[in-house]
Image (spheres, rainbow, N blue to C red):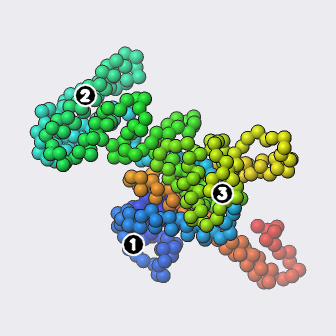
Amino acid sequence: MLKHIRNISDESVVEQWSENCYYQYFSGEKVFACGVPCEPSELVHFRNRIGEEGIELIFKESIRINGKDGKEDQGTTDTTVQEKNITYPTDNKLHRKIIKKCVAIADKHGIELRQSYTRILKKLLMDQRFRNHPKNKGKARKADRKVKTIAGRLVRELDRKLPPSLHQGTLTLFKKVLAQKKTDSNKIYSLHEPHVQCMSKGKEHKKYEFGSKVSIITTKNTGVIIGALNIEKNVHDSKTLLPALEQQQRLTGIILKNNFVDRGYRGVKDVLGTNIIIPDTPSKERTSYEKQKLRKGFKRRAAIEPKIGHLKQDHRLSRNFYAGIKGDNNNVMLAAAAMNFKRMMNIYSKMFLNFFIRLVYSIQNLLLPQNIYTLTPKTGF
């Protein structure tokens, strides 16, 4: 939790823990410890050991400590993209990685390749430079096709020379990458993260994002995150409501009366007993009171947008460094739990600050003579 609350890496949180007495008290230490608590890699093993069920329990506890603020029967929902820690995918990058991995597999098993293509690939790399210049476009495209041809040769050669029980899944993945075309669906954008999806959310500064879709549910008035679910496929927003509300009801035990969403959720009106409210043209049958109530609800719905922004910038949701689909699921719930814990930490710190200020002014008024003008918390702070 310290890692996601402070937005630092495994190595940094272990290093800072040995220097920060507040971190140690937060973790349950009674006296200051002068050594590191564990190796950074042990945090990875711990996350794998407790699994998604254990991390969901942590998320559930973060909702519980918010008390009645997390028990509202009105909610807001929105989706965002959790980007994976991969390079921007291009066909040439994937083909060159296939070549590199094929050579590594051949060296590992002592297979002699007909040709290593080292010198040819170096020359082709020079031809692919400055590809946007009008004079270099044809030469760069020709070099791209040659790199793809070399990758296909190496994959077929390994398929012939390797035993059937070795690396068949890897070679199948390589063949799928080499066979896919620009207009295909369910394309592979990364060799080590083949489940990554390409998504477009209409952002001007970022046309495409590569990762997984995330559904976030917050309480309408207090902003406590009561649902955070990773969606493996790039589906329509309306299709994410059922699993998201299932998780919310499992964690809180409350069926939301109303759930305010944006127009991207068009197509659904009721999910698991929750009324889905989408902005639309008001009918003449609605009273002015009903229109005003809906208008206020949609204004409050907009508060989820900065909530998602803080999840990304402050709690490690902008780029997911955890491996696999399991890592996607874990990162979403840990980020949401960290934000709920941080909310309560801020509330407690404000309560302590107000108590301390009132205590100081009370002592000041007791010690100073009554005929001398003294400051009060209302005018002096």
Name the amino acid type tagged 2.
Thr
The residue identified by callout 1 is 37
Q: Secondary structure at mark 2?
A: helix
Find residue 354 and report its horizontal and vertical position in percent: 71, 72
Q: Check disc 2: other Cα within 10 Å, few if <14, some if 14-19, many if 20+.
A: few
Find residue 376 and report its horizontal and vertical position in percent: 81, 72
Q: Residue at x 66, y 56 (%)?
A: 274
The residues bearing labels 2 and 3 have C-alpha atoms spaced at a distance of: 56 Å
The residues bearing labels 1 and 2 have C-alpha atoms spaced at a distance of: 51 Å
Residue 227 appearing in the image: no
- Dot placed on the residue nearer the N-terminal end, 1 or 2: 1
The residues bearing labels 1 and 3 have C-alpha atoms spaced at a distance of: 47 Å
Find residue 168 and report its horizontal and vertical position in percent: 23, 45
Q: Residue at x 53, y 50 (%)?
A: 214
Which residue occupies the foreground of this view, 32 or 365?
32
Residue 365: quadrant of the picture? bottom right
Which mark identifies residue 149?
2
Q: Check disc 1: other Cα within 10 Å, few if <14, some if 14-19, many if 20+.
A: few
